[in-house]
Image (tube, coloured by chain):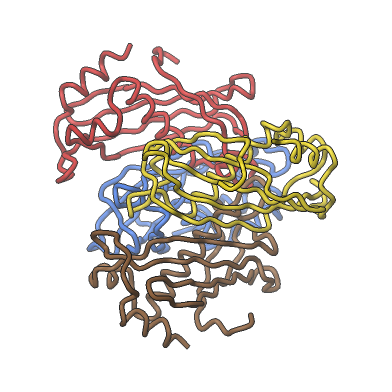
Chain colours: A red, B brown, C yellow, D blue
């Protein structure tokens, strides 16, 4: 990690997240990132409910994952999350996944980019100030 | 099959539907049943869009699957579907899955029971007459 | 609950577990049951690793769920699990799901039946004595 | 498309692929890419079975998706796939998804990069000549 990740959460690999190659399916990592993202946002004060209460939502516009090592059923994964870049109406979240059941080796990395949107019209809107401040105050 | 199934559709097993035991994950069969159900309903004239246009929806209240033999990645499955029982405000759909890539052996059986509901209030309602007739006219 | 459940675990609903009806997809409950089952077995001393070490595995032969009320994204679900019936070479596990975010209402119930099998040949075998004792000692 | 895609396949959106935002879940696109990839490889003569028979497998090392427009339940998606870059021991596959139920608009784009590996040791190996030729002969 070139920059510190101020937040992490753990998840245990579920059986239905594995595939016939015996390890976690590649697509599944985006879901794991997403679970960590929800917890990260709650951690900085923006539960999903608060977003809806403040009438904004996040639209996913880009997602990327790279895979370093397989993770297996029942492995304990630590997922780090941070706001890597906060733009006018978009935020890129960064993720790193370490496998605590396998000597803490790096398992996957990735990014999810969202745009903030009005929750009713789904029109793109500026990142709300309170949300931006929370994201930037993280470290 | 004790009674004939008037409808079937085929699906090829996707890699992400398998798990680390090497075959299709047990929970995934409910999704396969559901895909067959959608095609069966379209076949008898009730596309999902038509249901919404006629202001009713289906709420899933019960689901069951039993497993006879594993199915593997890229196997071609034939899924039979019928309306097994049409009640006042509920319908039980029956399913049988045969594996065309494995000598057509029986792979799984099951049922999904739905109640018909107003699509806006989600309140239970009688099975609409047109829907009932289509279900009963199937063979 | 007519009989007490000696074990429960909690899970938070993930966004990818919901569907376009706005709540947890019906098939997903089998995965939630399965996650609870893994934790229950660990609780009684049978981690998945121990099963493999003792050369047996579980084959899923039957699964059932009934749905009482929808559960939504980020809801906290408490899943109860017990061994409902231990047969010669099969075990039926029972599940009840309560939604702690919605006044603890009953959300779903269900069962998963497994047969014990040799982990290499996948041939059915008697429930190993140690496993049987652990299952029966639960309460 | 700056370069032509010689292959495409269609998939209908399944209900369990949607989420509570009402459209296909972002992570699910990687699975849709993967289904198209399997069909593309079969089209150029490399069914998964043939790969295993020739003792090589593909390890997923990188995946990316960008999202242009939502796709909804029962929409018919056309997924284009090609081998975008064939390296020494890796292949990057490119994908474009168009929604035939929504005026054929672009829905998502992405890439999956795999390395070829010995199917038993999972050690990286050169892209087998027959496979390379099939990939490069595609258009």
Compared with B77, C19 (above or below) is above
Asked whether the viewer can see residue A14, the reply is: yes
Asked whether the viewer can see residue D82, the reply is: no
Q: Percent position (x, y) of residue C17?
A: 43, 45
Compared with D74, B54 (above or below) is below
Left or right placement of residue B67 versus residue D27 in this view: right
- Viewer-closest of C9 and A14: C9
Q: Percent position (x, y) of residue B105?
A: 69, 71
- The residue at the far front in this view is C2
The quarter holding residue B20 reads top right
Left or right placement of residue A12 versus residue A134 in this view: right
Q: Please give the count of numbered marks on the rendered protein.
A: 0
Left or right placement of residue D88 versus residue C19 in this view: right
Residue plotted at (71% across, 49% down): D55
Q: Percent position (x, y) of residue A111?
A: 38, 30
Q: Percent position (x, y) of residue D88?
A: 56, 38
Residue plotted at (42% across, 88% down): B137
- Viewer-closest of B43 and C124: C124
- In which quadrant will I find the N terminus of chain B? bottom right
Residue plotted at (64% across, 62% down): B66
- Viewer-closest of A77 and A88: A77
- Viewer-closest of B69 and D92: B69
């Amino acid at each position: 990690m070139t920059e510190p990740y101020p937040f992490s959460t753990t998840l245990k690999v579920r059986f239905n997240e594995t595939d016939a190659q015996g390890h976690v399916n590649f697509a599944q990592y985006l879901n794991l990132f997403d679970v960590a993202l929800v917890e990260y946002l709650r951690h900085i004060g923006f539960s999903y409910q608060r977003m809806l209460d403040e009438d904004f939502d996040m639209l996913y516009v880009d997602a990327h994952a790279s895979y370093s090592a397989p993770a297996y059923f029942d492995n304990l994964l630590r997922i780090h999350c941070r706001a890597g870049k906060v733009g006018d109406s978009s935020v890129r979240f960064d993720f790193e996944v370490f496998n605590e059941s396998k000597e803490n080796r790096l398992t996957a990395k990735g990014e999810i980019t969202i745009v903030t949107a009005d929750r009713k019209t789904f029109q793109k809107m500026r990142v709300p100030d309170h949300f931006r401040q929370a994201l930037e105050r993280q470290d």
